Structure formats: structure tokens, C-alpha cells
Amino acid sequence: MAEGLYLSSAVQLAHRAFRDTLRAGDTAVDATLGTGQDCQLLCQLVGPGGRVHGFDVQPDALTRTQARLAAAGLLGCARLHLLGHERMGERVPPGVRLTAFNLGWLPGGDKRLTTRVDTTLRAARAALHLLAVPGLLVVCIYPGHPEGAGEQRALLALAAGLSPRAYTALWQQFPNGGPGAPGCLMIEKIREAPPGIE
Ligand SMILES: C[S@@+](CC[C@H](N)C(=O)[O-])C[C@H]1O[C@@H](n2cnc3c(N)ncnc32)[C@H](O)[C@@H]1O
């Protein structure tokens, strides 16, 4: 999509949400490290007193992120995990202010190593569970390939089923961007859900 003033991309919407939400000292999660671009911004926003937990299943993504953060002097607040995001609960304590997913494959990498519907859905549930109140889940979704279309369906169904007493959900898409246009899903936790209710 062409660079614009306010509506260039789903990632631009996500980054705006990062800036609006995160404060120095917060804990954030980057569930899909990739090249580390999102992680770098998260680290800048939480600062040296904060913490960013990053996850990816590809060693190359961790190497690229580590190099980027080191060059920016931001490694101190980051904890990088070579682990599927669906297992984030094993490494991240509750109280996360913001969790970001940027779905799909590693830019410049193997397109077969994309995020997958079942693990993405499990990870999104884990992320909601770990969020603080208030806390925000931000997911950039790319439905232009079959797995991405499945992720979009599954995540929108998850969002639609959440109790409005505990969560507020917002889905933004580019209606003139064609059938594979990316979207940005945000879910804010506004109250701890009673046990058994999402
Ligand atoms: C579109 S890229 C992320 C872009 C990244 N946030 C950035 O700033 O460059 C998607 C990433 O998700 C990773 N991924 C795929 N399955 C995963 C899983 N189960 N857990 C964590 N990461 C996964 C891929 O290896 C890939 O690096």
C-alpha cells in the first residue's frame, strides 16, 4: 500500500496503538519477532525499566532481532524466546500491558513457515489471559493467503465471542484494498473475566 498521512498500513495502525498504550516500565510481548521491527518500537516505548518478551520459532528471526536491538542499544529490556507463541504462558507472568502479533511469514524467509490457525488461536487466548487490566492485544492479519484467511476467520470468531463486560474489540480493514487486504484486530481487556467466561 502507498505511504499516506494516516492510513498507510495495518502495521501503522498497530504502531499507533503501541504508542498510545505503552508507558515506561510496562511489560509487553512481541509474539512474532520476525525482523524485530515491532520489537524495537516496543522496547523504545517501555524503556530500560520495562520488559519485552519476544517469541519466534525461527532462529534467524531471533538473530535478526537481537542484532537490531543491539544496534539501537535496546537489548537490556528484551527477553527473546525461541519458542512458539502458543507457549508464552510458560515464560511470561500475568500483567502484560500490550501483546502484538504480526502474522504471516518472516520477510525474506521461507513462506511455508507462516503462522498457523491453530497455534495462533491458542496463542491469542494465552495472550488475553496474561493481559493486565487495562491491557491491549493487537493483531495484524493478512488474509491474502489460505492460512491467513483461516486466521482471520478464527480470530474474528474469538473476538465476537468475548464477553463485552470484560473485553472491547475493534476490527479495522481497508475496504478498497482488495480481497486480501490486511486488517488490524485490537482487543482491550477492561475487566478480569469471571472464571469460565471469556
Ligand atoms: C510477519 S513475521 C513478523 C514480523 C515482525 N513482527 C517484524 O517486525 O518484522 C511473522 C513471524 O512469525 C513467526 N512465527 C510463525 N509461527 C510462529 C509461532 N508458532 N510462534 C512464534 N512465532 C511464529 C515466523 O517465523 C515469522 O518470523
Image (tube, rainbow, N blue to C red):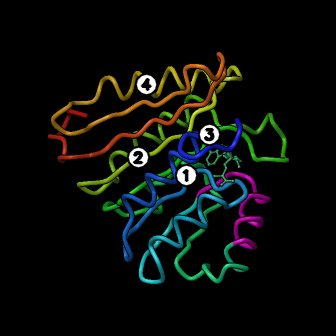
Label 3 with label 1: CB-CB less than 8 Å:
no
Please tell me which of labels 1 and 4 falls first in the chain: 1
Label 3 SS: loop
Mark-to-mark CA distance, 2 and 3: 13 Å
Q: Nearer the viewer, residue 147 or 184?
A: 184
The amino acid sitting under disc 2 is: Leu
Label 1 vs label 4, nearer the camera: 4
Residue positioned 71% across, 63% down in the render: 62
Please tell me which of labels 3 and 1 falls first in the chain: 1
Residue positioned 53% across, 25% down in the render: 152
Quick one: label 3, few (<14), some, or many (20+) residues within 10 Å?
many
The amino acid sitting under disc 3 is: Leu
The amino acid sitting under disc 4 is: Leu
Please tell me which of labels 2 and 4 falls first in the chain: 2
Image x and y of residue 32, in percent: 61, 50
Quick one: label 2, few (<14), some, or many (20+) residues within 10 Å?
many
Label 2 vs label 1, nearer the camera: 2
Label 2 with label 1: CB-CB less than 8 Å:
no
Is the distance from the Cβ of mark 1 to the nearest ligand 1 atom less than 8 Å?
yes
Q: Is residue 158 above or below residue 92?
A: above
Quick one: label 4, few (<14), some, or many (20+) residues within 10 Å?
some
Q: Is residue 15 above or below residue 173?
A: below
Residue at label 1?
31
Residue at label 3?
103
Residue at label 2?
137
The circle drawn on residue 156 is 4
Image x and y of residue 21, in percent: 36, 59
Q: Main secondary structure of the magenta part?
A: helix
